[in-house]
Image (spheres, rainbow, N blue to C red):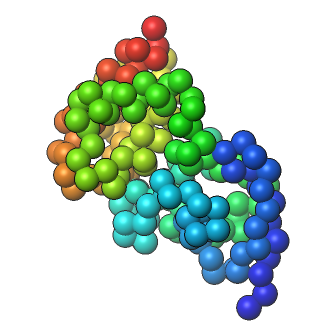
Amino acid sequence: MDRIRISFRLNGVEREAFVSPEERLLDMLRDDMGMKSVKEGCGTGDCGTCTVLVNGKPVLSCIMPAFQARGKEITTLEGLNEDSAMKVIQDKFREYHAAQCGFCTPAMEIVGYKLIKESDGVPSKEEVKEGISGVLCRCTGYYDIVDALRSAAEVIKK
């Protein structure tokens, strides 16, 4: 099958890729671009571990065709690792032991980052629960994740 040439921004850098029509964004990011923070859990859009930001919005990369990235800004955890807010979030995840196996952690951090950045203040426990509801965690029970994100928001929103 013919491959399609697409141009897009990945973590702030102009990139180009040749993708097949059936290739998923997840596969392009992991296999072709080396973005290993993007995880495949279910492959059907149910678990959220493949979440990335597309034009600033959380998107499940396992169900988005790669060709739809044409002209878009894609942000993975690798693109946020130097952001001061993300550093606070990651520090709080360590402090609160919010990661156990770590498989969901990149997606949790990305959705937590977006939630905190868009909130007017420190989000309530309910707002954090709602914000992370699209990412499944089978290890932590979520309490430590919620507490870590709220604590991060207290630092970031000062």
Q: Residue 88 versus residue 107: which sits nearer the camera?
A: 88
Identity of the residue drawn at 72% across and 42% down: 12
Q: Position of residue 20 (x, y in %)?
A: 70, 80
**Picture layout, residue 83 above or below residue 130:** above
Instruction: State the count of labels.
Output: 0
Quadrant of the rendered image containing residue 131 = top left
> Viewed as shown, does residue 85 lie left or right of 10?
left
**Picture layout, residue 74 above or below residue 25:** above
> Viewed as shown, does residue 121 lie left or right of 151?
right
Identity of the residue drawn at 70% across and 60% down: 69
The quadrant the N terminus occupies is bottom right
**Picture layout, residue 142 above or below residue 9:** above
Identity of the residue drawn at 42% across and 40% down: 109
Identity of the residue drawn at 48% across and 31% down: 86
Judge whether residue 146 can be spotted in this image.
Answer: no
- In the picture as drawn, the residue positioned furthest to the top comes out as 158
Q: Position of residue 107 (x, y in %)?
A: 43, 48
Q: Position of residue 87 (x, y in %)?
A: 46, 28
The quadrant the C terminus occupies is top left
Judge whether residue 144 can be spotted in this image.
Answer: yes
**Picture layout, residue 133 above or below residue 2:** above
- In the picture as drawn, the residue positioned furthest to the bottom comes out as 1
Q: Position of residue 67 (x, y in %)?
A: 72, 69
